[in-house]
Structure formats: C-alpha cells, structure tokens
Amino acid sequence: MIAFWIILTGALVAVTCGLLGCFLILRKMSMVGDAISHAVLPGIVIAFLLSGSRETLPMLLGAGATGLLATFLIEYFHRRANLQTDAAIGVTFTFLFAIGIILISVFAGKIDLDQDCVLYGEIAYVPIDLWVTPGGTILGPRPIYILSAVLLIVILFIKFGYKELKLTSFDPAFASALGISTALWHYLLMAAVSLTTVSSFESVGAILVIAFLIGPPATAYLMTHDLKQMLAITAALGIVISVVGYWMAYWLNASIAGCMAVITGLCFATVFVYQRIRVTHKRLTHPEPATD
Amino acid sequence: MIIHTQEPILEVHDLTVSYSRKPVLWGIDFTLPSGSIAGIVGPNGAGKSTLLKTIMGLIPPSSGFIKLFGRPLEEIRQRVSYVPQRESVDWDFPVSVLDVVLMGRYGKVGLLRNTGARDRSIALECLDKVGMSAFAKRQISQLSGGQQQRVFLARALAQEADIYFMDEPFAGVDAATEQAIIGLLREMAAADKTIVVVHHDLQSARSYFDWIILLNMHLVAAGPTEQVFTEEMVQQAYGGRLNLLSQVGDVMEKRAFPSREN
C-alpha cells in the first residue's frame, strides 16, 4: 500500500507538471518552471511565519503569491528593460530564492522548515500524511487529494483553453490580431504552473518538480510532431517514470525523488540516442546526394 | 503626393508610432479604396511592418487613429485578416498543415469551443485554393519556404475576411510561388476583397499593385500606382539612403515584367 501511494503521488505530479511543461517548452519558457519553483520559497516562509502552522492553505496562498510575483517581475524586466527572458528569469528567481533562504536562516530556531526539505522534498512521507476526519475515519494520504484536484484543474484548463493555448504559443501576433489576449493566456498558464509547483512542492520537492516539468515533455517532443500526441506521451511517460523510479529507489535504497529524476533524464537520453542512431542509419542506407 | 479616395475602406489618420519614445512613423495619413491590391513600399527600416502591425492593433500608436470600414478595429475584427511574416513563428511547432489553417477559424468559433466539420471543410477548401491540399496532414516542419507561405495564406483565406494585411508574403519564395500568390490575390481583389501587402521589391511593385503607399518613416506618397509611383517619388523615398538612383530610373523604364535569376 505504501508503494502504491508513493507511486500514485509521483504519477500525479508527473502528469500535471508534464502537461503544463509541454506548453512551456513550446513557448521557449522552460526555465520559468525553474524560476517559479524556487521563487515560491519566500512565500512559503512568510506564510508560515504569519500563520504559524504548516497547513496547506496558507502555504499555497503564500507560495502562489510569490510564484506569480516572479512571473510578473520576469515579464516586467523583459518588456520594460528590454532584458532577454532568460536573463530576467535568472535575476528574478535567484533573488527571491535567496530572500527565502535568509528568512529561513534568520528564523531557523523558530520554524520547522529547512532548505533540504523544500528542495528535495520527501515523497516517502506521503503515506503517513493522512487525512483524518473529525469522526476519526482515515481517508488516505492528504497530498493525493490535493494533487488530484490540481490535476483535474489543469486538465480542464488545457481542455477548454486548448485552441487558445496552442495559438498563443505558435503565433502570438496572429492570436492578438484575432482578438485573443496573449497576455491573459500567458498569465493563466503561469498561474497554473504556480499552482502545480506549489502543491507538488511539499510532497516531492523543487528538483523533482522541475524534472517533471521539462523532462517528459522534452522527451515527447523528440518522439512526435503532433501536439495532442505530445501531451499523451508526456502523461504516459510520467506514469512510467514514477513506477520505475520508485522501484529503482527501493532496490538501491536511495532517495525516491532522486531516482525518479534520474529515470526522467535516462528516458530523455535513451530517446535522443535512439533518434540519432535512426537518423544516421537512414543516412547510411539512403545517402543524400552531395550538395556541393 | 497623397491621393485620397472618396469611399475609403481603410482610413489611417495622422498616425505617429514610436518605440521607446523614438518615433518610427510620423504623421501617416492615407486612405484605401475597396477591392484594391495595395503595396506598402519603402527601404529597409522605413516602418512598413510597423505600419501593418499598428493597423492590426499589435503596436499602440502614439497619436492618430485608424478606421476600417469606418469603425475601430475592435468592432470589425471578424472582417480583418492578418498574415504575419513567415519567419515570425517556429516552424518546428508540433502541428499539421491543416491545424494551422484551422487557426484561421478560431476567431469565428469563439472562446472555449472547438472547430467543427464545417470549419474543417472550409480549411480544406482554402488549402486547395493555394494548391496545398495534398499537404493537409503533413507536419509543418517538413515544408519548404514557399509552402509555408502558402499555408499562411490559406489560414488567412479561412478567416473569410474582407480586408487582408500581409507582411512580406513574397519574401524567400520562388518565382513560381510568387506568381501563384499574386494570381490568388488578383482573384480575391476581383471578388471585392481588399489586400494590403508589405513589399520591398521595386521592380515588381508596379505590375503587382494598383495602389501604392511609399513609405520612409514619413509618408512619401499614396495613391493609384500610375499617378504616384513615379521616378521622382521613388527617389524621394529611397534618396539619401541608397546610392542606386540610376537603378531606380532603370526600374521606372522597365515597364515590362522583369526577368529573374533562378
């Protein structure tokens, strides 16, 4: 049962992150996920200091607020200061993350939070974080409910906003000409990424969130030239990675999140090498005529 | 020299556009009649694309206003189509040719709804018009430059608009595609559609367009081609920036269709 809950948590996070990650990659904004997942740290700490508890809601609110603040700052520096997006991302998230680190170290004695927990998370604790009703009934691990709800929101968001997300990613100028607000869809996507990162964060940690945001979509991108297929492959990969990652960790007695991230990387590498071999093989069997 | 039309379909009034306080277009003021193929012509950096983007509402003007069919753009978006520069998008994006053409229907379909069978048949029809129906299922990453341009054109046709704004539709396409495109534009104009094209080849401008807008940050001339596309006006637009004045004269003499390399 423990294995089941952990694998399910991993799969939920992987699928949610992966679906959004597809659009991040296509918008050439992969690093935004990285930025948001780090920028939420000060929000979490401040929410903790204000509420004095590790309840989910204040954490989500605090983290969501700084996550969105980060995306606003990135857009602002990019538009107003004419800074390249990657530079704007680099400046913004390191700054916010550092504030979070300082807050943690200043209040270190008083709060039950540490950098390791935030960065690496501890997916192995998911099965003991149970949701118990006042009547005493045990409804299973709390994160499963939260993550399922977030996955549902993300799926509905992509289902109903599919054509707008696709068009604003592919050709923003044409989208604006049709009267579709590119800014609105940018921020909706960013809000979805913030929500996902923040809710995944406490169970699996920032590193795995980033790995899931970009790894499976990047692998799927190599495998297909169809957006719907890319989303489907990403979701399937997420589940496979979660299962294989868990058993690898079990077998090696290593960090579960770490193993899942390693499997993500291995999947990408395998597909990449396979594609290279296929291309080279094609060239050898059907040599193209020399161009010069 | 600015010649206005009596019943304008597009009205640009005293338009000034600036990028971070530096004006790139000054006091642009012209009108366009219905059913014309108009060329926006001028040297590099003259603000041709900027003018088009401002008309499409993508860049806010510093002053002045634009009216299409006598109304502001927001009210008549459905009747306006835009073809961005081909290089402005990522052609490795995972969509098929038909997907891209269907995007032309998004404005008509509306929010939260999907394109239906009717949109599909319109899209296929438009692909047929540009001679690309065999490519409907193809991934866009497999297209040549000329084919990409045709797909963009098909997407614009799918919008079923009354006025079309095209940013450099002839850039980087071969002579055959260029002829196919201009043929299509003439058909559209015959059906009383208005077409505005950003173009930078002086040689072909005369034969392609029946209305010319000569631009070099300010408006040099606008009006029917025979009246405004004179050597004097072209020199005024290009003068000082190019050392090719004799060549400009050359172009003016060559009224016949020019021969092309490749």
Image (cartoon, coloured by chain):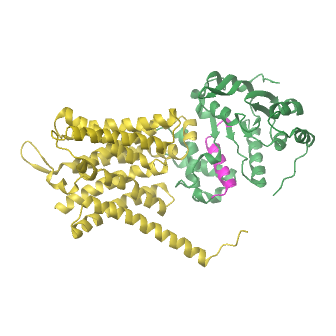
**Where are the magenta residues, as a range?**
B143-164
> Is residue A164 among the parts visible in the rendering?
no
Residue A125, position in %: x, y? 17, 54
Residue at 20% from the left image edge and 38% from the top image edge = A107
Does the magenta portion include A257?
A: no
Is residue A250 placed above or below B135 in the rendered structure? below
Residue A35, position in %: x, y? 38, 44
In the visual, does B82 lie left or right of A154?
Answer: right
Q: Which of the two residues, A214 or B182, is positioned nearer the viewer here?
A: A214
Is residue B86 placed above or below A229 in the rendered structure? above
Note the chain letter of the yellow one.
A
Residue at 42% from the left image edge and 66% from the top image edge = A269
Residue at 34% from the left image edge and 46% from the top image edge = A37
> Is residue B146 among the parts visible in the rendering?
yes
Quadrant (top left/top right/bottom left/bottom right) for the N terminus of chain A? bottom left
Which residue is situated farthest in the right direction here? B253
Q: Which of the two residues, A47 or B9, is positioned nearer the viewer here?
A: A47
Does the magenta portion include B156?
A: yes
Residue at 90% from the left image edge and 40% from the top image edge = B246
Residue B167, position in %: x, y? 68, 41
Is residue A8 placed above or below A159 in the rendered structure? below
Q: Main secondary structure of the magenta part?
A: helix
Q: Quadrant of residue A57?
A: top left
Q: Quadrant of residue B193?
A: top right
